[in-house]
Image (cartoon, helix red, strand yellow):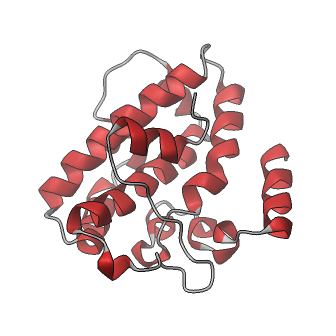
Amino acid sequence: MVTNIVEAIQQKLGYAPLQKVDANSQEIKGVNKLSPEQKLHQAAVPAVLAAILKYSDGTEGINILKNEQRAWVNTIYSGRQEDVIRKVAEYSGATPETAAHEMERICDEAVNFVRDSIKTPDPEKLRSFMNSQRHNILSHLPAAMKVGDVLNEETFDDRTNKMEGPVSGFLHRIENII
């Protein structure tokens, strides 16, 4: 089983592999060479997963593990979904309608993946699992979209979340433990 939520969503939905953000430029290398569809996936997957990460840490986060059908994008963005949909659409060149549809597909898959990974509805297990995915998610999130601003989570767009290498990898592992 894939333990990286970004890779799991990408594979399940049949997307091309997503690129990591360069820690220095805060952008995807070769972003201009990506097709509009790849840009949409590149923007939407980490934007949705960042919102799930934030939502799972709140008091209502346990709803992800319950068998309730929802309009998940509306739920995880708590009324700010139009802002993020616009940002994903602008980044990718897609229409807002296309971005919203794709984000809902991604969100449904992500919720299913989280449910499959966490068998019992336990808020602490949910937080722990999503925190273990934090680096995987944020290292794919283009800072240009400023999703952290929309979610009131300024650390999401911080370059330290996107750094790679032996020292950064060690620090990210410590971060996951804490």
| Residue at the spot 58% in from the left edge and 65% down from the top edge | 156
Question: Residue 135, relative to residue 131: is it above or below?
Answer: below
Q: How many marks?
A: 0
Residue 97: name its quadrant: bottom left
Q: Nearer the viewer, residue 3 or 78?
A: 3
Find residue 50 and report its horizontal and vertical position in percent: 51, 53
Q: Nearer the viewer, residue 11 or 92?
A: 11
Q: Residue furthest bottom?
A: 25
Find residue 41 and report its horizontal and vertical position in percent: 33, 57
Residue 21 relative to residue 86: left or right: right
Find residue 108 and report its horizontal and vertical position in percent: 34, 33
Residue 167 relative to residue 62: left or right: right
Camera sees residue 83: no
Question: Residue 106, relative to residue 67: is it above or below?
Answer: below
| Residue at the spot 31% in from the left edge and 54% down from the top edge | 81
| Residue at the spot 37% in from the left edge and 18% down from the top edge | 68
Question: Residue 119, relative to residue 46: is it above or below?
Answer: above
Residue 94 relative to residue 69: left or right: left
| Residue at the spot 19% in from the left edge and 46% down from the top edge | 101
Residue 178 relative to residue 63: left or right: right
Find residue 37 and report its horizontal and vertical position in percent: 23, 61
Camera sees residue 5: yes
Residue 44: name its quadrant: bottom left
Of the 4 image quadrants, the one containing the N terminus is top right
